[in-house]
Image (spheres, rainbow, N blue to C red):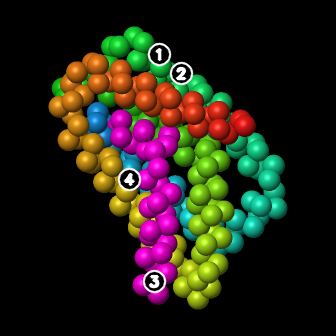
Amino acid sequence: MLNSALHGFAMALSLIVVIGAQNAFVLKQGIKQQHIFAVCLCCALSDAILISVGVLGFSELVLLHPDWLNIAKYLGATFLLIYGAQHFHQAWKGEQHLDVTQDDVPCLWKVLLICLGLTWLNPHVYLDTVVLLGSVSTQYPDTQLYFALGAISASFLFFFSLGYAARYLQLIFQRPQAWKILDLIIGCVMWSIAISLLK
């Protein structure tokens, strides 16, 4: 029981830690101190749903219907290319700065829609959570639930740690140059993922 939970935790953490579109977005919201709890909860709950679906055996359905992944692949690539272009544009304009008293906090629904897009339109998320974790969970036929709970715990721990630890970078991001670098990095991450999806 404990062994399967720990294995699920370690497997999920190793997959989530790799920098991706979701992580970059959570990091940026954490630095800006904008809707952190909602963004972290959105990411963690999305992972929890996908992990549960994978463990319940839906990974086999995804493998039987590869067209689903193809549709998600092209939608995701388009979304990431547009989102990455926005960050390149922000880096070029160089107008971003950190102002803790700023009143132009974006609407929660807009932030959550971007967050959901970065999560649910990314085929890698399905491959990692539904297919990979779903497949590995079959090694624990009697304790799959504990494997899933371990994986879900890793997701919650990672996203909330990333979101709330980002505040320690605020001093650095009071300089516009730091935002330019972050926007360029995020843009590169988004476009590299998009290109990898189209290959």
**Figure check: 63 above or below 3:** above
* Residues in magenta, as a range: 1-29
For the point 44% across and 68% down, the residue is: 10
Task: Give the spatial CA distance, label 3 vs label 2.
Answer: 44 Å
Contact (Cβ within 8 Å) of mark 1 with mark 3? no
Amino acid type of the residue that numbered disc 1 sits on in the rendered structure: His
Q: Residues within 10 Å of mark 1 (few under 14, many from 20)?
A: some
**Figure check: 196 above or below 9:** above
Dot 3: element: helix
Amino acid type of the residue that numbered disc 2 sits on in the rendered structure: Ala
Can residue 142 be seen here? The reply is: yes
- Residue 163 percent location from the top left of the image: 32, 47
Residue on which the image places disc 2: 85
Residue 159, disc: 4
Q: Nearer the viewer, mark 4 or mark 3?
A: 3
Amino acid type of the residue that numbered disc 3 sits on in the rendered structure: Asn
- Residue 159 percent location from the top left of the image: 38, 53
Identify the image quadrant of the C terminus: top right
Q: Earlier in the sequence, mark 1 or mark 3?
A: 3
